[in-house]
Image: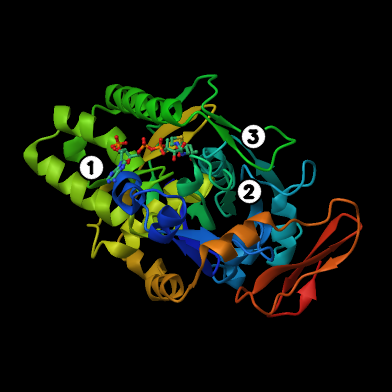
Amino acid sequence: MEIGIDKIGFYAPDLYMDMRELAVARGIEPDKFTIGIGQEKMAIAPITQDTVTLAANAALNLLDEKDKEAIDLVIFGTETGIDQSKSAAVYVHELLGLDPVARSFEIKQACYGATAGIQMAKGHVALNPDSKVLVLASDIAKYGLNSPGESTQGAGAVALVISANPKIMVLENNSAYLTSDIMDFWRPTYSDMAFVDGKFSNEQYILFFETVWKQYKAKSGLGFKDFEALCFHVPYTKMGLKALKPVLEEEGTTEDQKRMLENYQKSIQYNKIVGNIYTGSLYLSLLSLLEQKEELKEGSRIGLFSYGSGAVGEFFTGIMQPGYQTQLNTIQNTDRLSSRRKISVEEYESIFKQELPVDGSTIELDIEKDSAAICLAGMSENKRQYINKRTYGSN
Ligand code: CAA
């Protein structure tokens, strides 16, 4: 049975920060952010968007009634969850009106969470061929104002439907993976902000790619010539390139190098203007390739490198399906990204400092300013209240 990605949706909040303006405010040469790091814009989540709403908005327009009937598993990958006990998947399950006969849970391993979810979804569909699985990847990346990681923040979510006979991409079985206990990036339960050893994290990302690529080649007997494109986890758009280039220069023909580098550029168009969305970043890069490259030939192979600090890495592959374009919402996605509102550094800093109550008190949030259908409307007695403006229902 062939199993893989049947649908893919995306949501980023409607506010962004221009990286050049942020650089000037921090006394940094703007080219460092736009060329050295490779980021042009950074999505900023208003207080009315959290990890749950971003994911629900990503999935909202994706699912039809048949999907809703068939989905019996919701897996939510995140490293910026909103509750240490209840999973974000349960909130999204309700907000989307999914069938109650379903398993829903959250999964965590830094930016690797959604990949773990996809591999688990494959196993579930193999055992239950009529089932569909909703895999959500949603995060708000925060390192802190004026911190070295500030230029690599972002916010957004990707939603994927995994099923048998998928219409976008069949996932192959030759995955290569690796676990190593390292401290390159972590966030203790008492901290809203991530801690990071930036240079070490870059080195480990590169090392993990080299290692799983080698392992994959030994397992599969395949190499660059067998690939149309490689998509990477993209904390910032220069990162994937730093890992790809040395290996490509050593092993790839001139033709391989040209094809891989051209397609890498297509695969980072969305990441460049959204920023790091942690566990969704690899899938945002895949979506960028699918929507920004004119055509990927039927049967062509795409490689995916997933990296979650701490650390787990995986290289896996998929085969493009005929007519995959009919499953995409390119115009809607590009329109929404280009109609976002630019905010000033002052507004960004003020949003960054906003906090929800932690003492059980009640707050009502102004959801009129947020164009998203699903918003966080407030909090009371330590419970978040969500609203879907389309149905005026809340939970
Ligand atoms: N014009 C052009 N380029 C310039 C420049 C200028 N004026 N000034 C500097 N640069 C270049 C530098 O030469 C450098 O390029 P290379 O990397 O190719 O050498 C690049 O800009 C970045 O400069 P620095 O290394 O000096 O930047 P930094 O010390 O500010 O740190 C960072 C960069 C380590 C990525 C930091 O932003 C950070 O810690 N980010 C968070 C961690 C992260 O994203 N790690 C990635 C791997 S871990 C992961 O992937 C998991 C995850 O999602 C977190």
Left or right, 285 with respect to 93, comes to left
Q: Where residue 167 sits: x, y (%)?
A: 40, 60
Mark 3 packing: few (<14 Cα in 10 Å), some, or many (20+)?
A: some
145 displayed left or right of 380: left
- The residue where tag 1 is placed is 227
Label 1 environment density (alpha carbons within 10 Å; few <14, some 14–19, many ≥20): some
Q: Is residue 18 above or below residue 302?
A: below
Which quadrant contains ligand 1? top left
Which of label 3 and label 1 is nearer to you? Answer: 3
Q: Nearer the viewer, residue 383 or 34?
A: 34
Whole-Å distance between the Cαs marked 2 and 3?
Answer: 18 Å
Residue bearing mark 3: 187
* Residue drawn 68% across the image and 47% down it: 81
Q: Secondary structure at mark 1?
A: loop
Marks 2/1: CA distance?
Answer: 29 Å
Residue 266 shown left or right of residue 25 in the figure = left
Three-letter amino acid code at disc 2?
Phe
Q: Position of residue 356 (x, y in %)?
A: 78, 57
Dividing the picture into quadrants, the one containing residue 171 is top left
Relative to 259, residue 289 above or below: below
- Depth check, front residue: 383 or 255: 383
Q: Position of residue 115 (x, y in %)?
A: 50, 41
Q: Secondary structure at mark 2?
A: strand
Q: Residue at x 44, y 51 (%)?
A: 283
Instruction: State whether label 2 is within 8 Å of ligand 1.
Output: no
Tell me the residue that label 2 is attached to.
Answer: 76
Give the answer, above or below, for where 367 lies relative to 130. below
Quadrant of the snapshot with the C terminus = bottom right
Instruction: Tell me: 3 left or right of 250.
Output: right
**Residue at point 60% right, 58% down?**
349
Snapshot quadrant of residue 56: bottom right
Q: Determine whether the residue tagged by mark 3 lies in a helix, strand or loop.
A: loop
